[in-house]
Image (cartoon, grey):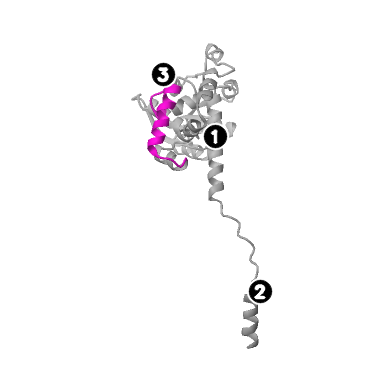
């Protein structure tokens, strides 16, 4: 049984990756981490594991590699689709995969790295990555502003009820919108929608921007209103003066 530590700030991507790896009887996820600090703790807690971590966490790579070697573990980098794998391979990590990799390639990568081999994307695979994400651009342009807000919250891991509360509508309305979103993206459920979004950089960036805007709106709504300066009432001051003087 090969132990796997999964580290990525994207909750939906972690869930999708865990779902894929769970189909292999030889792989067992022993920890899931949402940030670099938790990842470092997991690496030092579970020796002899395969660490799959997102480059977006921006850990101190040299330090991480040394810790992995000390613990008898190996590292696989989840690179963004527009990144080059070369810097990570030169740093001494044992595998690089892209976010838009297939499930079978992901499992094969983990198996080979666990067996002591090195896995890196083939040049042919790199050549297939387009400079312009036409699919992501087309889907982004087809989604309405309300649909994009729903997509952004799904990528954050929100359920229908929470989305309805945050967008000040009903769950049924959200379900109706989701049917339209599924038709436009060609997916069948919310997990596929989140993974589809994250795999297409243009769409992912748009969803992230909308998500940040929603968060800012909510913070503005909950911020306490400034209290007006209190001005002493002339009448009140007069009453106090009378009370003190006894007149």
Would you name the residue on which mark 2 appears? 234
**Quarter of the image where one finds residue 21:** top left
97, 70: nearer the viewer: 97
Q: Earlier in the sequence, mark 1 or mark 2?
A: 1
Circle number at residue 210: 1
CB atoms of marks 1 and 3 within 8 Å = no
Is residue 110 shown to the viewer in this render?
no
- Identify the element where label 3 is drawn: helix
**Dividing the image into 4 quarters, which one contains the C terminus?**
bottom right
Is residue 244 shown to the viewer in this render?
yes
Q: Residues within 10 Å of mark 1 (few under 14, many from 20)?
A: some
**Quarter of the image where one finds residue 205:** top right
Q: Is residue 82 above or below residue 210?
A: above
Viewed as shown, does residue 22 lie left or right of 141? left
Q: Which residues are magenta?
A: 167-192
Residue 36 position in % (x across, y down)? 53, 37
Q: Is residue 189 magenta?
A: yes
Assign the magenta stretch its main secondary structure: helix
Circle number at residue 104: 3
CB atoms of marks 2 and 3 within 8 Å = no
């Amino acid at each position: 049984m090969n132990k796997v530590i999964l580290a990525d700030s994207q909750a939906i991507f972690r869930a999708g990756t865990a779902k894929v790896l769970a189909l292999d009887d030889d792989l067992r996820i022993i920890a899931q981490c949402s940030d670099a600090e938790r990842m470092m703790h997991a690496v030092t807690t579970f020796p002899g594991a395969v660490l799959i971590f997102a480059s977006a966490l921006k850990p101190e790579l040299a330090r991480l590699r040394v810790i992995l070697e000390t613990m008898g573990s190996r590292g696989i980098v989840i690179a963004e689709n527009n990144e080059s794998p070369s810097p990570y391979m030169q740093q001494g990590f044992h595998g690089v995969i892209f976010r838009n990799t297939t499930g079978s390639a992901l499992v094969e990568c983990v198996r080979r790295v666990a067996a002591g081999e090195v896995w890196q994307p083939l040049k042919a695979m790199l050549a297939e990555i387009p400079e312009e994400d036409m699919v992501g651009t087309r889907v982004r342009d087809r989604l309405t502003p309300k649909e994009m807000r729903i997509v952004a919250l799904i990528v954050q891991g929100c359920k229908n009820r929470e989305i309805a509360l945050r967008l000040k509508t009903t769950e049924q309305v959200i379900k109706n919108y989701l049917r339209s979103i599924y038709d436009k993206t060609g997916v069948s459920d919310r997990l596929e929608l989140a993974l589809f979004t994250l795999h297409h950089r243009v769409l992912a960036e748009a969803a992230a921007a909308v998500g940040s805007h929603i968060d800012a709106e909510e913070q503005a709504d909950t911020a306490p209103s400034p209290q007006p300066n209190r001005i002493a009432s002339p009448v009140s001051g007069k009453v106090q003066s009378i009370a003190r003087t006894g007149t």
